[in-house]
Amino acid sequence: MSTRNPILFNDIPAESGLRRALEMHPLDIVAEVRASGLKGRGGAGFPTAMKWQLAAAAEGATKYVVCNADEGEPGTFKDRVLLSDFADLVFEGMTIASLAIGATGGIVYLRGEYTYLVAHLESVLARRRQANLLGNDILGRKDWNFDIVIHLGSGAYVCGEETALIESLEGHRGEPRNRPPFPVNTGYMGRPTIVNNVETLCLAARVLARGATWFRQYGTHASTGSKLFSVSGDCAKPGVYELPMGITIADLLVEVGGLGAKAVQVGGASGHCVPSRLFDRTLAFEDAPTGGSIIIFGQQRDMLAVARNFMEFFVDESCGQCTPCRYGNSVLLDGIERLEKGTCSIRHLNELKALGETMELASKCGLGQSAPKAFLSIIEHFHDEVLGREPPHFAA
Amino acid sequence: MLPAQQARLAADIAELADHHGRCRSALLPILQGIQRDHHQISDFAMQEVARQLDIHPVEVYGVVTFYSFLNTGREGRMVVRLCRTISCDMQHKDRIARQLENDLGIKFGDTTSDGRFTLQWAHCLGMCDQGPALLVNDQVFTRVNCEQVHEILENCRKTFTASGHVLTTGHGHGTAKEAFAR
């Protein structure tokens, strides 16, 4: 059994998932997805079937399927590949979801940085409308009406958070909402809405095409199926890899030519930094979860510079709504500057750690809750490297 | 802003609102259209959008100032955005940054005095496996080296020459080549 390209990059006939869904009762579609154990691929790992089931059960004639293509996590570029080379599969997944929950409207929220993909996506949508894969009475199934529009973001990382994304769709600042209510009940325009990652929708289409049992043969018990990994940094063969969930970091490094790495950032700026002695950890929801971002650091890399890059990112991208995130990120960045200058006491560093832990607990949304992770893990694993630095010298 | 310019901007906004709809959820597409065509969302533009959508101008201001691709100040016709995130950083984005500053004669955050170029930082552009990456308006460039910085900017400048030339010749004045010779 090949472990490379088992599901998404596999040569499965186009629209076979959609054609099978066509014969099924909506509840059976949800049941099939539940049996597959599919979890959201954006990073949070929420069970996809539960979202679909809640939205399906919600009252209302108008419901929405939103494809979260606001791929902004540093080091992630798998959705760009799916949208470029597998756009039909993305739309197939959305169309299946529409049948499962009874939605009539589909929206792709595409990040502004990917505006160059719009023409391609629009042409694929036009072709699908022509083939009656979208529109009214899809593939002859009476009263199955569904169409998809593309909505562009405008350069805000936080809009990848599903409630911020909905705010943005509605024409507001992309500030995350309090939950509950959840989008499955009160989503876009107050209607039941599912927001799924690009990769999740593609995988759902594959689950319908080949069945839950086939899907479950890949991955681990808690993390079924495969995962697209966006691999960058110090390795011979950076790119997008489809590998089974549960692969160890060490095995992935062999695959991509990244042997001898000093550390790997799993999950992008909002993920953890894993040092080489822990490379036997597995990439799965139950161990080291990732939305796909894998950034490899060679022995020559300064881990404090890495931490600074991530912290600058969060200082910029915090929406400013809640205090732990708005203020905490700036304080952590200031701490990194002290470490760089060699003027940070261990007492102050301990305070920064406590602050980071507070941010994890007290921030309103996933952005603030995960912003300190990179800093905390780098401080933990590379203590010796970051303490007691000599101040940078300047030429006289 | 001259009254004639205001009238033209208002007409453009009305057209965008006709196209996208006069509802709150059309706000971002309308603002994106103004930014694309006018390189700025001015106070007047924000007031006009608010009037068209029947919302308070401050609501529009709140949205414009939230998103990094929307700007109240004037941007150049070409916005160059260099990715500063870690993977591009490790692929020597600093050298590309210096070369861009040298070739444009401006610093990051600034616009050239002729209003043609704005230079900005961007966060991850999703090209981490082929950095350093930059965007020029909507177009993406990957694996950029210092020499290509010059080429990219020169190609942009040629676009300006071409569009300037279209403006001067207008419609129906022979082929482009003839017009250029004149």
Image: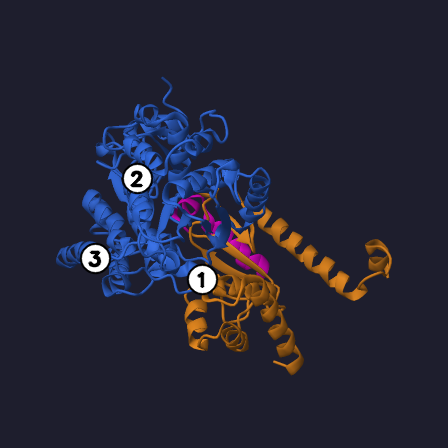
Q: Are marks 2 and 3 in contact (CB under 8 Å)?
A: no
* Amino acid tagged 2: Ala
The blue-coloured chain is labelled A
Secondary element under disc 3, as helix, strand or loop, is helix
Q: Does residue A275 sit above or below B167 in this rendering?
A: above
Q: Are marks 1 and 2 on the same chain?
A: no
How is the protein colored in the picture?
Answer: by chain
For residue A2, side relative to residue A349 (left or right): right
- From the image, state the color of chain B: orange
Secondary element under disc 2, as helix, strand or loop, is helix
Q: Chain of mark 3?
A: A
Magenta-drawn segment: B85-104
Q: Residue at x 81, y 63 (%)?
A: B169
- The disc placed on residue A359 is 3
Q: Chain of mark 1?
A: B
Residue A355 on image: x %, y %? 18, 58
Query: Circle 1 sits on which residue?
Result: B68
Secondary element under disc 1, as helix, strand or loop, is loop
Badge 2 or badge 3: first in the primary sequence:
2
- The disc placed on residue A49 is 2
Residue located farthest toward the bottom when viewing the structure as drawn: B3
* Amino acid tagged 3: Met
